[in-house]
Amino acid sequence: MDFPHGTDAEAQDIISAALHGRLTPEQAKRAARFDLVLGAFAWIAMAQRIATLEASLAGAKGPDPATPSGQIPVYTKPPARKRKGKPGAKPGHPGHCRPSPVQIDRHEEHRLAVCPDCGGPLQRCQRPRTRIIVDIPEAIRPEATEHTIHRDYCPGCRKHVEPVVPDALPQATIGHRAVALTAWLHYGLGVTIDQIVDIMGCHLQTRLSPGGMVAIWQRLAHILEAWYQQIAADARESAVLHADETGWRVQGTTHWLWCFTSQKTCFYLVDRSRGSPALQKFFLEAFDGVLVRDFWAPYDSLAVGDHQCCLVHLLRELEKVDQTNQAVAWQAFAKKLRRLLRDGIRLRKRPDFTPDAYRARSQRLDCRLIELAEGTYDDGDAQRLANRLSKYRDSIFTFLDYEDVPFENNHAERQIRPAVVLRKNSQSNRSERGAATQSVLMSVYRTLKLRGHDPLGVMVEALRGYMQTGELPPLPGAVAVAEG
């Protein structure tokens, strides 16, 4: 720190003491008798000291519990917990290794001529063993097919007619499988466009341009619009629907990506609004099921059968306040609320739980919740959360009234995570049409995945049927899982 001309050693001692937190009352009185410039330097030094202490205190407390893991520096994260026990299935349970291939394409024999250690002759034995290795062929070549299309004249219609080529979209130079694969890599797995160009060109020997892929994806999204609307209808008819939203960018402007998902359906919507206008675009009428959501206020305006607010968000809010509020009143309130929520979660996790069997216990939990919500608290944070409990008192323990309703919104967060990865890799969308393509293709691919289908096979067959009939086949339902 540079001092003004004429500042003596005593003044420098005062500044140093203020900077290191050792300023005595006598030094403060002497600093007050100096000129205003020295007083300003002393105040600046103390402000720097306070800022340094606050920064170190914040680092000791750790990051905000609500901060996403990707925004936390790696060097501030605690070491990962070591796995307890050996990896794999528990003793007595079947393993989860990769199944053996159904067909063996090639056989090779391996036998030594001499001993590898001493070079001596070997006595032949009949003790062979087999080992199956699955690998990708070294040279994967695209298949180029030349289609000769015969055009004939129809005297009845008085025009020339020709057959439809079902293997590609009109005027497209790449087939359905290449289109479906590239779209799945981008919208289903979050691979960037440049990476897809490298994968197709280096590994699959198929040269594609970024602009050509984007154009064919937009055509694909237009064709799949009927499936997109069917997915929305299926989601609205679900008994349990999860909802979540995250930030998005369209041509540099802030938008929001909405996710409405059930166990077999996933619908995405990119919209400029984060409030009721976006929700009204999806909920065309009253929803009779249970909506699992967070405490975002626009959800309150929906006509819904029942709401279930995510208890994980509420518990995380308690952890967040604990870092800044050590008041006795707050600690007492937080302890009661944690115990209440955890009692409800433990009740639901009982192996023999059914809503009817534990109706009395559920009612006692509701009474405890009402008592906690209607209380008056001197602590501001306690009163704020009490008001929230009072507002959402009918949406806290809904999961105790239905066997298939969870107490958290993890399913929606898991379904929206692929979009977050894609946003981080590709920086969202550059146009409204790109956002619409994003919504359609992500919804289709995620829904097919949830329903247990091979996205590539289903997409290729659907496009072939569309080229032959002009209409998409029905959206595939969930694959039945064989018992036993």
Image (tube, helix red, strand yellow):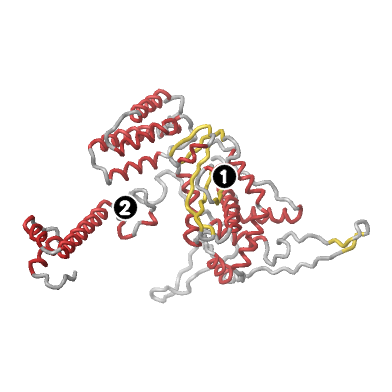
Q: Kindly identify which residue carries mark 1.
A: 265
Q: Kindly identify which residue carries mark 2.
A: 63
Left or right of 154: which side holds 6?
Answer: left
Q: Amino acid at mark 1?
A: Thr
Q: Amino acid at mark 2?
A: Pro
Q: Position of residue 85 (x, y in %)?
A: 34, 49
Left or right of 209: which side holds 21?
Answer: left
Residue closest to the eye, 69 or 462? 69
User: Which class describes the residues within 10 Å of circle 1: few (<14), some (14-19), or many (20+)?
Assistant: many
Query: Quadrant of residue 398 in the image?
Result: top left
Left or right of 183: which side holds 43?
Answer: left
Query: Quadrant of residue 44 in the image?
Result: bottom left
Q: Position of residue 256 (x, y in %)?
A: 51, 51
User: Which class describes the residues within 10 Å of circle 2: few (<14), some (14-19), or many (20+)?
Assistant: some
Q: Position of residue 259 (x, y in %)?
A: 52, 47
Q: Earlier in the sequence, mark 1 or mark 2?
A: 2
Q: Which residue sits furthest right?
A: 155
